[in-house]
Amino acid sequence: MFRFEHPEYLYLLFLLPAFLGLFIFSMIQKKKALKRFGYMPTIRLLMPDVSLKKQYYKFWILLACIALFVFIIARPQFGSKLETVKKKGVEVMVCLDVSNSMLSNDITPTRLDKSKQILSKLVDNLKDDKIGLIVFAGDAFIQLPITSDYVSAKMFLSSISPSMVPTQGTAIGAALNLAMRSFTPSETSEKTIILITDGENHEDDALGAAKAAAEKNIKVNVLGVGSLQGAPIPIGGANNFLKDAQGNVIITQLNEQMCQEIATAGNGMYTRTDNTNSALKAIQNEIDKMSKSDIESKVYSDYDEKYQILAWIVLFLLILEFFIMDRKNRIFKKIKLFS
């Protein structure tokens, strides 16, 4: 695994455009100064040995040296092996509803997109905790096994869509049961399930699954997504909506009562998701209240320093820059390989 020991030094790369601007400005000023002496073609005849190209070569070499030096002080490293480390944290399994009703836009931009935004911010706030992700509609699938790799968690989040689960429906019970089996068996840390759904068209024993989780000391916290007034489900474009067998536009509504009952059965908290950050704050507070205990994580250790390669390249470029003269070399000028 590759990393920089001090990635904050990489911000120094933003100085490179400034150096380029200063060089261009200085070359313009040089040309203006020469023009004051007379006609430029005549002045060039008076300075036959001056090489403008070499001045550019020297600058680009120095600019490359500065860039490589920034990478050197940032200390590029490669991890040589995986090591098990213990940290204080909790385990969180997220069950995300990806049924077609989650495409409704009564929550901006849509119910599903808002849910993904909340989860992305939640992952950013995690420290030493583990997180896993289950997506469900008519069936439930593990999208991300429980892990402390937050980069992978956010990457998987971005690719979620209703097409991931071909069977439509809202199998909340199946998702909760799968979540209970997905925690690390050997861990003694506190565990919680975050259920994000509009609760509509539930088709299995969600309350029974929530009670089973509570009996295992796993709290089920529920985020209800949508409005009580409801909205149509867009398909294939902004002007097309999902219709029933009679041709009527289907209006999907948040089943808040079901969501509250699941949270109660799971000894957890229920909150409604709206266009503010209140739901994120509520669920973050629930996680913060959980007692942290030792959890094991796999991390890369024994990082090898790789700056030496860059240092040798910088040394070679500096030596090369030293031998490049501003004037044309009369000896090499006489050599004509293609005459």
Image: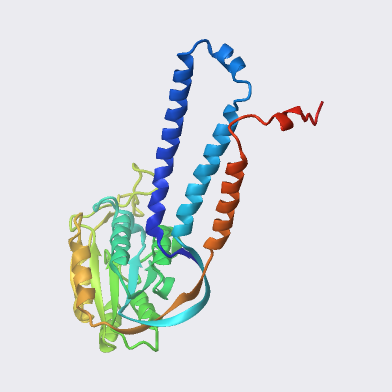
Residue at position x 54%, y 57% in the image: 311
Q: Position of residue 84 (x, y in %)?
A: 44, 82
Residue at position x 50%, y 43% in the image: 63
Q: Is residue 316 left or right of residue 202?
A: right
Q: Is residue 173 above or below residue 280?
A: below
Q: Position of residue 30 (x, y in %)?
A: 46, 24
- The foreground one among 252 and 217 is 217
Q: Position of residue 93 (x, y in %)?
A: 34, 75
- The foreground one among 281 and 74 is 74
Specify the farthest residue to the right: 339
Residue at position x 42%, y 61% in the image: 155
- For the question of whether residue 36 can be seen, the reply is yes
Which of the 4 quarters of the picture holds residue 184? bottom left
Q: Is residue 233 above or below residue 136?
A: above
Q: Is residue 328 above or below residue 105?
A: above
Colouring style: rainbow
- For the question of whether residue 161 can be seen, the reply is no
- The foreground one among 35 and 268 is 35
Q: Is residue 269 left or right of residue 35?
A: left
Q: State how many labels appear.
A: 0
Q: Quadrant of the C terminus?
A: top right
Q: Position of residue 296 (x, y in %)?
A: 39, 83
